[in-house]
Image: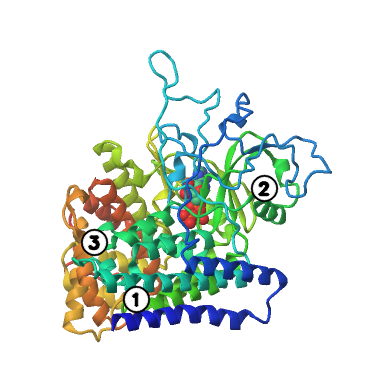
Amino acid sequence: MASFKDLNKLFNGLSLIANEFVKRSSPATTTDFETLIKTALLSATNLSGLTKGKVRQFSKPPPSPNAAHPHASASNSVVFFTDNPSPESDPQLPTPTPTTITDNDDIAHFSSEANHQEASDGYAGAVAVEKPEFPSSTETVNEGVSGEVAPVPPLRKRRPRERRVPATPFSRALGFAGLGAGLAWGTLQESAKRLAFGTPNSHGNQSALSPFLSEKNAERLALALCRMRGAALKIGQMLSIQDESLVPPPILAALEIVRQGADVMPKSQLNQVLNSELGPDWSSKLISFDYEPIAAASIGQVHQAVMKDGMKVAMKIQYPGVADSIESDIENVKLLLNYTNLIPKGLYLDRAIKVAKEELSRECDYELEAANQKRFRDLLANTDGFYVPIVVDDISSKRVLTTELVHGIPIDKVALLDQETRNYIGKKLLELTLMELFVFQFMQTDPNWGNFLFDEATKTINLIDFGAARDYPKGFVDDYLRMVLACANGDSDGVIEMSRRLGFLTGMESEVMLDAHVQAGFIVGLPFSRAGGFDFRSTNITQSISHLGATMLKHRLTPPPDEAYSLHRKLSGAFLACIKIGAVVPCRDLLLEVYKHHKFGEVNEILSSGSVSA
Ligand SMILES: Nc1ncnc2c1ncn2[C@@H]1O[C@H](COP(=O)(O)OP(=O)(O)OP(=O)(O)O)[C@@H](O)[C@H]1O
């Protein structure tokens, strides 16, 4: 039976390819045709297991010939610009007088964490592109007592590959089709292996149950997402912020690859985007630009540059084609998910996908992100402990965003800091979340841990990435605050009433569903239920919710309101961050503080047990 199903999956995978051929054949251009041939070859070799994408191992680069130069020594990919650009220069390198440019095909350096000062921020969700480890004369390295430089053992981790972004809808669709076929083939291989050698012990491990979830398939999926970038990768990264105990190990490993960052654009493609977005004289505002990215995110990559006034900036440059392919990328992901039969009923995938599409198209608009960032900068100007970097309008456009470069440790990496500092960070994160929703009614909804960079020296959390930010209507915020309080106070009538008003329940639900819903609410409300510090080190909130989740999926009558998708992602992201860093946070005190100052709108109903006492 199982093998028949798997054959069916293989057939479906191949039909994905056939579909794309039929759908796309008429408007195909010559370039599309070339891509088609390349992709077909890649898929064919992938099917036969030749290029299914092992993470490449890179070798250490030779020492920079410019090591004496104070800037170039930090990275041999930095280009310095003179005031008098040469008119005969290569059109791909605007206003050039490049000092040095890395010309290797692969960005290929290993570096040690200890040496990793400037770009230590580069760990974040999207990130992990480290600088080469040649300290400049001005940099500090580990110095022994004798003053000699102590060798630091290199830290090996996945290095990004340099790959062109498939920029036309046709080439992207083919990428997905190739992936579909690769996964189908992987599933078949795994099934055959199981027929021959038996199914591995399950012990509740999903990967053992489904031949689709084999290690090879998970890796295949991750590497394909890193190559495709765009909407599909973004969804993968969203999924990567999960409770680790709930996700099967092969998928967890694959998501970690995805979380570490995408492949990077080659220089020629990067220059094309910069020229078309900022004009050919974009470099006239800069002293230098580093062609080696500090981050390769889902929809763009980030480069360091120095402005004429000396300010160090981060330039986020969008991959070509991703904004126009959101719709088709998501449809392709949906096809893949459907054919794997992995999506449980009750997820209301269509509604979630509609919301994801809207969010992603907003995120591709960097002018909107710049406006969001300026708004947050104003809103947080007088709040201690947070900093929002300056937006540089002069060197920004719809697809390029330049902001002041900030530093810090991404919050998932603060686990080694002392307990007091971790408690402080946890408290600040929760305080910010509550403030955004209930005070500003404007929230940055991407809980990616790399978006919060903790600067130990100033005890400040530097906030970046405002692409996903949205307003919440006053009525929604009022009722949501009442609901959180009802959850915290163990008030089931209040939870049900507010849930109906907010649209989580229709009023027609069965007792089983109502009970599961209320229990889930109480679990989420647990950190807010008692005064004093809530210890996130000993909580199993996410596991408890997942048990109830199964019941809710079975009995749910309506999808959650649109506002809830991003909001719940953010709230669970904040909780997961506190769990990850093992913080003890006075959650109830923070909530009551917000409640005390909240001005409810006209319908200020009092909950059955909603009287609040500190
Ligand atoms: N102003 C900045 N200062 C320092 N680093 C920055 C800055 N802006 C971006 N970065 C680095 O680039 C990474 C990606 O930037 P950002 O999160 O804005 O991009 P994104 O496309 O929205 O990424 P994601 O796919 O993670 O949402 C960040 O995690 C951070 O490491």
Mark yes or no: residue 29 visible: yes
Give the CA separation, mark 3 to mark 1. Answer: 19 Å
- The answer to whether mark 2 and mark 1 are in CB contact below 8 A is no
Mark 1 lies on a secondary structure that is: loop
In percent of width and height, residue 351 lies at 41, 77
Res 205 quadrant in image:
bottom left
In percent of width and height, residue 606 lies at 23, 69
Name the residue tied to disc 3: 542
> Which is nearer the eye, 548 or 185?
185
In percent of width and height, residue 301 lies at 55, 52
Which of the two labelled residues, at mark 2 and mark 3, occupies the earlier sequence position?
2
The residue positioned 44% from the left and 17% from the top of the image is 148
Name the residue tied to disc 2: 394
Res 169 quadrant in image:
bottom right
Mark 2 lies on a secondary structure that is: helix
Mark 3 lies on a secondary structure that is: helix
Q: Residue furthest bottom?
A: 508
Quadrant for the N terminus in the image: bottom left
* Residue 293 left/right relative to 355: right
Q: Residue furthest front?
A: 196
Name the residue tied to disc 1: 343
Kindly identify the amino acid type of the residue bearing the numbered disc 1. Ile
* Residue 235 left/right relative to 271: left
Which of the two labelled residues, at mark 2 and mark 1, occupies the earlier sequence position?
1
Give the CA separation, mark 2 to mark 3. Answer: 44 Å
Give the number of the mark in front: 2 or 1.
1
Kindly identify the amino acid type of the residue bearing the numbered disc 2. Asp
Mark yes or no: residue 442 visible: no
* Residue 392 left/right relative to 553: right
